[in-house]
Image (cartoon, rainbow, N blue to C red):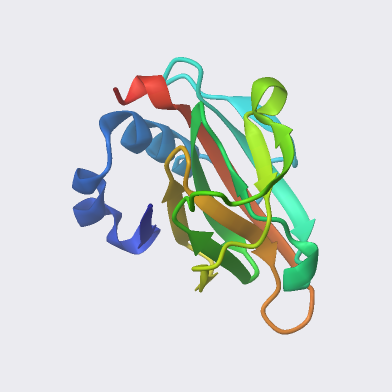
Amino acid sequence: MFYGQKADWAEARHYVPEAVRLAVEEVWALDLVALEAAKYPLNSVEGAFFMIQERQTKLLDAARPEAHKRFIDIQYLVFGVERMGVSLAEKGLALTEDRFEKDDIAFFAKPKNEFFMDLAPGQFVVFYPGEIHRPTCCVGAPALIRKAVVKVPAKAVL
């Protein structure tokens, strides 16, 4: 996992793989407020894409911990505030829904060693394959957020 903010990118960019850097910089060159909520291809990394999502945050118990296998998952908050649960993979953590094959996502039971971080506009998190995260949780009351979720094939960094 890598956590940062766009304002510090000039220094932080050196700590992420080149494919992640290229994809993030391509997305940040766009007007993320004006783009429609949809899925878009990226030209900088083969097989990479991003989604603009507008979502209502939810209470912690309504959000599900998830992980991915084939894609690095970069979540950049455009507006709103979002709490995320984060955990390392735990042996024996119950899989509640396996959609790895079709959608590169699986959902899990609540991890024992989960911690939480709040994202503000301009902040981002990079989740590598297998890292458990629980996005779209509310801080206080549920509220609207807008974010760009960038997907970079893990094979692009190997």
Q: Position of residue 139 (x, y in %)?
A: 67, 79
| Residue shown at the point (62%, 68%) measured from the top left | 82
Seen from the viewer's position, the closer of residues 56 and 112 is 112
In the rendered image, the vertical position of residue 116 relative to residue 6, given as above or below: below
Query: Can residue 34 be seen here?
Result: no
| Residue shown at the point (63%, 27%) measured from the top left | 40
| Direction front: furthest residue | 92
In the rendered image, the vertical position of residue 65 relative to residue 120, given as above or below: above
Seen from the viewer's position, the closer of residues 58 and 24 is 58
Horizontal side of residue 121 vs 98, given as left or right: left
| Direction top: furthest residue | 46
| Residue shown at the point (32%, 37%) measured from the top left | 21
Q: Quadrant of residue 134?
A: bottom right
Horizontal side of residue 71 vs 93, given as left or right: left
In the rendered image, the vertical position of residue 41 relative to residue 144, given as above or below: above
Q: Quadrant of residue 59?
A: bottom right
| Direction bottom: furthest residue | 140
Q: Position of residue 145 (x, y in %)?
A: 70, 62
Query: Can residue 79 be seen here?
Result: yes
Q: Position of residue 44 (x, y in %)?
A: 40, 22
Seen from the viewer's position, the closer of residues 81 and 128 is 128
